[in-house]
Amino acid sequence: MINKEKILVIQTAFLGDAILTLPMLQKLKEMYSESEVDVISNPETSEIFSSSPAVNNVFILDKKREHKSIFSVIGFAKKLKERNYTKLFSPHRSFRTALIVFFSGIKETYGFDNSSLKHVYKHIIKYNYKEHEVMRNLDLVGFNHNDDNLKILPELSVVSEQQKRVNDFLTQHDLNNIIAIAPGSVWNTKKYPVEYFEKIIDYFTSKFYKIVLIGSVKDEVLCNDLLSRFRQNVISTAGRFSIIETVQILKKAKLLISNDSAPTHMGVCANIPVLTLFCSTSPAFGFYPYNERSSYLSVDDLSCKPCGIHGYEECPIGTFDCGKKLNPQIVISKIEKMLND
C-alpha cells in the first residue's frame, strides 16, 4: 500500500500508553510509506514520540496549563486545519480528544467504541478488552494481526549525547551484572510493598548482582529510601536520566522488576526480560510485558481484585492483600528462573 497521506495520531495519556502506541505508529508508517505521520502528545511523553523513527512531527497539548480550558483546546484543534490532514487515528479516548477531533475538520477519523463522544469519529473500531493494548491499537489502524504481532517491539532512537551520558554513568559506577528495579507508580495500590523490595534487593546483592533503581523525579524519595537501606551494590537513577537514556541503561540489565506502570514498557523497549508485579490491577487489562522471556506475577484469587482500572491512593478495604500476599520469596524464585532460562 503506497498511499500518500497526512496522518495525525492523538495520544495524550500516560507514559506507558505512549510507549504502547509506538508499534501502531511503526505499522502506520509501513502501510503508508510515503506519508507524513504526526502525533499530538502531552509534555511528559513528547520525548517518546520525538524519538520514534516513525514520527515526523510532535505537537504538545499541555492539558494542565496552556490548554486547560475548553476554549483553548478548540483553538488548538482549529489550527490543525492549516496542516490539511487526510486521516486521524486516536487511541486516546477522552472528552478533550473528542473536541479536537470534532473541530479539526479532518474527514477520515478513527476512534474506539468506548471513546468519549464516540460519534464524532467517522470510523468507530471495537475496543477488544481481551486483547493486549498493542493489538487493540493495531485494530484501530486496520492492521490484520495475530499473536505474532506482539513481537512488534517499540522502536526508539538515541542521539550521541544521550548515549555518552549513559556510557559515562555505567563506566563511572563499574556497572555490570545488573538487575533493574522500578519501585514506583502514580497510584499507591499499584506499588509492591517497599519492605518486600528490600528483601529482594538484599537477596540478589548477596548473589553479587548490582541493583539499579529507576524512576522519574517523583520516584526519587521512594528510591532514595530503598537506597539508604544498603551500603553497597545499589544505586538510584531516579530523576537523573531522560526516558530514552533510562531505556539505554535498561539494555545493560539482565532483568527488570517493575510494578504495573510505565517502566514495564520501557523494559520492553529495551527488549530485556521484564517481571511485572500486579498488585491492585490485573494482567487481563492487557498491559503486561509482551516481549520474549518476560513474565508477570499476580495474586488473582481475591474477590476484591481488580479494584479499579488504575488504582487508588490506598486500598479501598484496608487490607492490600493483592500486594502483601505476593510474598518476596515467590518473586525471588520467579526471578531466579527467569535469569537461568
Image: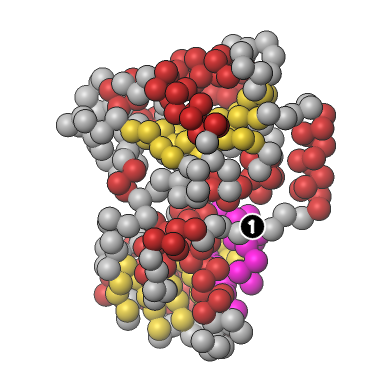
Q: Picture coordinates of residue 173 (x, y %)?
A: 78, 26
Which residue lies at the image location 66% right of the left edge and 30% below the top edge? 178
Residue count near mark 1 (Cα–Cα under 10 Å), binned few <14, some 14–19, many ≥20: many
Amino acid at pointer 1? Leu
- Which is nearer the eye, 321 or 68? 321
Q: Which residue is mark 1?
A: 156
- Which is nearer the eye, 238 or 172? 172
The magenta segment is 36-56
- SS type, badge 1: loop
Which residue lies at the image location 58% right of the left edge and 19% below the top edge? 204
Which residue lies at the image location 77% right of the left edge and 34% below the top edge? 170
Total label count?
1
Q: Picture coordinates of residue 76 (x, y %)?
A: 50, 70
Q: How is the image coloured?
A: secondary structure
The answer to whether one can see residue 193 in this image is: no
The answer to whether one can see residue 8 in this image is: yes
Q: Picture coordinates of residue 56 (x, y %)?
A: 64, 72
Residue 23 vs 277, above or below: the answer is: below
Residue 168 is covered by the magenta coloring: no
- Which is nearer the eye, 188 or 147? 147
Residue 195 vs 308, above or below: the answer is: above
For the view shown, which residue lies furthest in the left direction? 303
Which residue lies at the image location 56% right of the left edge and 57% below the top edge? 154
Q: Picture coordinates of residue 338 (x, y %)?
A: 50, 34
